[in-house]
Amino acid sequence: MILTFSLPIQMTLFLTSATTWGLIPRGYVSLDVLPTMLIVPIVLIVAARTGQTGWKLYPGATEKKDTATARNDDINWKAGVFYMNRDDRSLLVPKRFGYGYTLNLGIL
């Protein structure tokens, strides 16, 4: 995603600079923002499709009611850091300690 975001931004900055320097006539100002206007809908579609920490990637999977308690079970955590649960279909799960997410190594 970093390349997806950075390339259109760099192209927009380059085209804006080329317009400022006189390399591109000022009549083509809409050309400056064209790369960003093309990539924003693609990024929004990808974000809507794979958002919510990946739970939409498995449309047939059903979420269990006791997932939060199963995620805190010591059996699913190896060395207290690595999460491995084949029954939990989430790719990313909240870390047990601290902030952020960790990979569910059970579905890899």
Image (cartoon, helix red, strand yellow):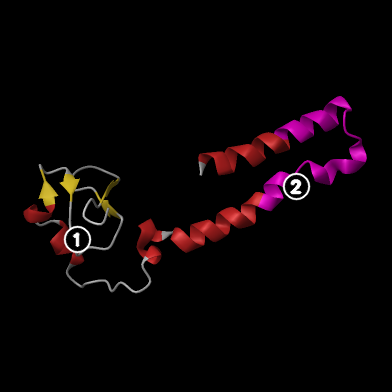
- Image-quadrant location for residue 13: top right
Magenta region includes residue 66: no
What residue sits right under mark 2 in the picture?
34
What residue sits right under mark 1 in the picture?
86
In the image, 19 versus 11, the foreground residue is 11
- Compared to 34, does 48 lie above or below? below
> Residue 29: image x %, image y %?
84, 42
Residue drawn at x 44%, y 59% as measured from the top left: 50
Question: What residue span does the magenta drawing correspond to?
Answer: 13-38
Q: Alpha-carbon neighbours of circle 2 within 10 Å: few (<14), some, or many (≥20)?
A: some
C-alpha separation, residue under disc 2 versus residue under disc 1: 44 Å
> Residue 56: image x %, image y %?
40, 65
Of badges 2 and 1, nearer the viewer stands 1
The kind of residue tagged 2 is Leu
Question: Circle 1 — which element?
Answer: loop
The kind of residue tagged 1 is Arg
* Extreme residue toward the front, this view: 108
- Compared to 96, does 57 lie above or below? below
